[in-house]
Image (tube, grey):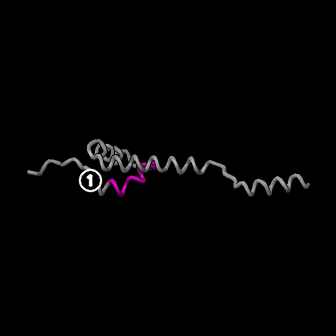
């Protein structure tokens, strides 16, 4: 008799290897389900994913800000007014 097929589960090491693919939306449906099942019961992995999501959001937000140094603004004003 053959053994019944065991349902594959992800462990924490699997999650570490795959969480960037997860956050980038590049996972196969089966892997996505397994990863989300793991996150349902593993608080440390869930916290790592949440931290990475927040970090990515902050980086995106900061990357969109147009911060121009005050010194550069003054130099540009001088050039514009002297023309």
Q: Nearer the viewer, residue 21 or 76?
A: 76
Q: Is residue 76 left or right of residue 1?
A: right
Identify the magenta region: 15-25
Farthest residue in the right direction?
A: 83
Q: Residue at x 8, y 51 (%)?
A: 1
Q: Quick one: label 1, few (<14), some, or many (20+) residues within 10 Å?
A: some
The quarter of the picture where the C terminus appears is: bottom right
Q: Residue at x 33, y 53 (%)?
A: 15
Q: Nearer the viewer, residue 53 or 18?
A: 53
The residue labelled by disc 1 is 11
Q: Position of residue 24 (x, y in %)?
A: 46, 50
Q: Nearer the viewer, residue 35 or 48?
A: 48
Q: Position of residue 18 (x, y in %)?
A: 37, 54
Q: Residue at x 29, y 43 (%)?
A: 37
Magenta segment's dominant SS is helix
Q: Is residue 45 left or right of residue 76?
A: left
Q: Is residue 12 left or right of residue 18?
A: left
Q: Position of residue 28 (x, y in %)?
A: 39, 48
Can residue 63 be spotted in the picture? yes
Can residue 25 be spotted in the picture? no
Asked if 28 appears above or below 13 in the picture, the reply is above
Q: Residue at x 47, y 50 (%)?
A: 55
């Amino acid at each position: 008799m053959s053994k019944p097929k065991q349902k594959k589960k992800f462990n924490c090491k699997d999650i570490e290897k795959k969480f960037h693919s997860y956050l980038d939306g590049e996972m196969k449906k089966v892997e996505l389900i397994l990863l989300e099942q793991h996150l349902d019961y593993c608080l440390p992995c869930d916290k790592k994913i949440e931290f990475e999501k927040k970090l990515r959001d902050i980086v995106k937000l900061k990357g969109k800000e147009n911060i121009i140094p005050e010194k550069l603004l003054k130099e540009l004003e001088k050039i514009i007014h002297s023309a």
